[in-house]
Image (cartoon, rainbow, N blue to C red):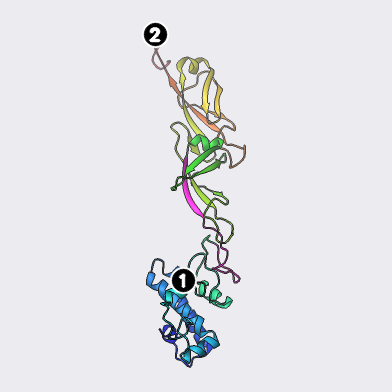
Amino acid sequence: MDPYKLLGVPKNSSQEEIRKAYRDLAKKYHPDLNPGDKKAEEQFKLIGVANDLLSDPEKRARFDRGEIDIHGQEQGFANGAGYRHYADGTQGFRYNQHAGNSQFSEEDLQNIFSMFGAGASGEGFTQQSNPFGPRHGQDKRYTLEIDFLDAVNGAKSRITLPGGGTLDVKIPLGIEDGQVLRLRGKGDPGIKNAPPGDALITVHIRPHPHFKKEGRNIRLNCSVPLKTAVLGGKLNVMTPQGEVSLNIPPHSDTGSILRLRGRGFPAKGTLQAGDLYVQLQVSIGKVDKALEDFLRNQPDGNQ
């Protein structure tokens, strides 16, 4: 196996020419740019072996004299050691997420990884970044459906993960549909003792059968008995925060709207809420004979 052919350079190439050829090929065959491509990964390893030999003047001279092979082993030895023994061993470079020493200089790393817009955690590489050193864990994304009343009042919920684990989630009162909660440190573990990633949870709110949200206000249709609508009185009304007693004015008709201040949807994480607007719907209920007789004797238009 000829390291010069692997790098595509002539035997009289300078160290700078070898270095440039290796850098260009490393960009081309890097596993991060060829996910799942085993041939590209093998080629990436091979050019690493070639570069290791040719970038060392003493090893390069010995290879040119025929004293050692591309793996740095004395010519004529028949111990069966080949490229894979070298590349997977302590003297070679094996690409994986825990790789240690590599043949990249700091400038090489900057050039090769400048094409990657972001690291595993979604954060851009800096000039001092070392992709083979500690790396922040990757963020994980989940979705969570909650009840409308939990969005209003806050709650605790739990997500079951694909692997069978769970995540406990605190729902802040006033959370909006589509809002993303961040659980720090609950993503993938970091590499080489780097911090773990975060869990990003998109929250969706299930609609309520009675309450309708309009901004920070909430609307509710409420049935009121005929007697209460005519004479006025107290009516127990359901609100997102619990049941309250509402004063119904006399002669209230269907469509009348009453306001309960501060019983609407709160601003996120605060107790400052909008209002609840209650629209009355008069219900005649069970009609007895006396009422029928009374209405029957009323002139038209005066009912």
> Mark 1 sits on what residue?
88
Element under disc 2? loop
- Mark 1 vs mark 2, foreground winner is 1
| Location of residue 261 with respect to 139 vertically, above or below | above
Q: What residue is rendered at 45% in x and 38% in y? A: 206
> Mark 2 sits on what residue?
288
| Location of residue 220 with respect to 203 vertically, above or below | above
Query: Which residue type does callout 2 highlight?
Result: Asp
**Which of the two residues, 64 or 278, is positioned nearer the viewer here?**
64
Q: Please check the rendered image and state whether residue 235 is part of the magenta-colored stretch, yes or no.
A: no
The quarter of the picture where the C terminus appears is top left
On the image, the x and y values in percent for residue 212 come to: 47, 35
Magenta: main secondary structure equals: loop
Q: Is residue 29 visible?
A: no
Horizontally, residue 78 falls left or right of residue 157, namely: left
Residue at the extreme right: 271
Q: Quadrant of residue 58?
A: bottom right
The residue stretch that appears in magenta: 123-145
Q: Quadrant of residue 282?
A: top left
The quarter of the picture where the N terminus appears is bottom left
